[in-house]
Image: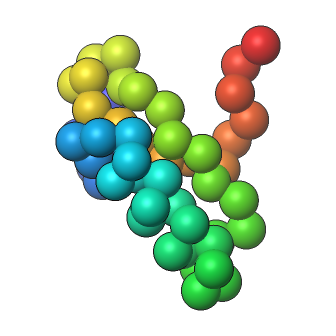
Amino acid sequence: MCTRKRAYDSVGHALGTAVHRVSTGEARALRAYRCPYCRLWHLTHKRALA
């Protein structure tokens, strides 16, 4: 599940972290998603499911 992933309380906080990580070169592209298990927000590099 998501116990090893960093969790964010809000989508804004998750997206702010994503912008920072992309702008510093730590990541190429990230998106935030709401976890169905813990109901918090995580970041992923994977595409959204259609």
Seen at 69% across and 27% down, the residue is 48
Seen at 22% across and 42% down, the residue is 9
Image colouring: rainbow
Quarter of the image with the N terminus in it: top left
- 19 versus 2 height, above or below: below
- 27 versus 10 height, above or below: below
Quarter of the image with the C terminus in it: top right
| Picture coordinates of residue 4, whole percent (x, y) | 28, 49
- 26 versus 34 height, above or below: below
| Picture coordinates of residue 31, whole percent (x, y) | 60, 45
**Which is nearer the eye, 28 or 14?**
14
- 6 versus 23 height, above or below: above
Count of numbered badges drawn on the protein? 0
In the figure, residue 39 lies in which quadrant? top left
In the figure, residue 23 lies in which quadrant? bottom right
Task: Determine whether, in the image, residue 29 is placed left or right of residue 8.
Answer: right
Seen at 74% across and 35% down, the residue is 47
**Which is nearer the eye, 2 or 34?**
34
**Which is nearer the eye, 3 or 22?**
22
Seen at 34% across and 53% down, the residue is 13
Task: Determine whether, in the image, residue 33 is placed left or right of residue 27.
Answer: left
Residue most extreme to the bottom:
24
